Image (tube, grey):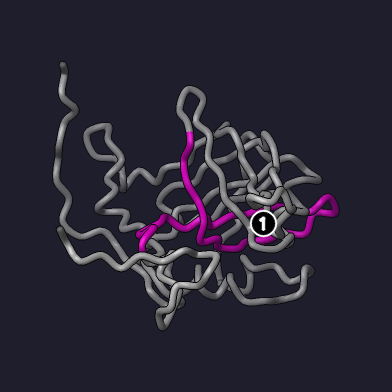
Amino acid sequence: MNDVYFYDPAKGHGLKHDPFKAIVAPRLIGWISSRSPSGQLNLAPYSFFGAFATFPAIIGFCSEGRKDSIGNIEATGEFVWNLSSRALAEQMNRSSAPVAPEVNEFELAGLTAAPGRNVAVPHVGESPASLECKLLQIVRLHNLEGEPMDNYLALGQVVGVHIQSAYLKDGLFDTHAAQPVMRAGYRADYAQIGEMFEMFRPTA
């Protein structure tokens, strides 16, 4: 039997830092662009992001606190996810600054707000790939006691996909070449793709 450290989160982890985010890692960054009803642009990265379905494709991100992205998306019903590559890591980090709602993070980070095709929200023109989404639902999370938390999960159906041609090779998106940046643990820990390998599902 291996020696295992166990803790009950309700009673505290007893460690220097909470290991939860380091265990559930790496995670793609939810680099979300949105637009307010008045047209103000917003761009912000979120640590909790994922893909949840195909046919149709559904993605989502969760905001800790009711931030501008959630308000914009709830009001307009649209958002875009942008792939944050290693080459764009500094700009992505700059867009996380706690600035006033009227500040345009595209401009703050020196990025191109490229127009959407099926949504009115722009995407990051420099990003290797972007997913235009229509809002399906915003879910306020609850804990085991049924108490509402200050966490908001936005789920969207992908209605448009932008891929820079440089990252398409033989009809496949080259994830390794795109080098997505991922959250990988504690406050300042990030990761990028290293060695990749293939493994196919069993057929029976």
Quarter occupied by the C terminus: top left
Q: Is residue 120 left or right of residue 178?
A: right
Q: Amino acid at mark 1?
A: Asn
Answer whether residue 91 is magenta in the image.
Answer: no
Q: Position of residue 30 (x, y in %)?
A: 52, 55
Q: Is residue 109 left or right of residue 40?
A: left
Magenta residues?
23-52
Secondary structure, mark 1, is strand
Q: Residue at x 50, y 68 (%)?
A: 92
Q: Check the image and name the residue furthest to the front.
A: 1
Q: Position of residue 181 (x, y in %)?
A: 38, 62
> Which is more toward the observer, 204 or 45?
204
> Which is more toward the observer, 169 or 150?
150
- Which residue is tagged 1? 151
Quarter occupied by the N terminus: bottom left
Q: Is residue 76 left or right of residue 56?
A: right
> Which is more toward the observer, 138 or 99?
138
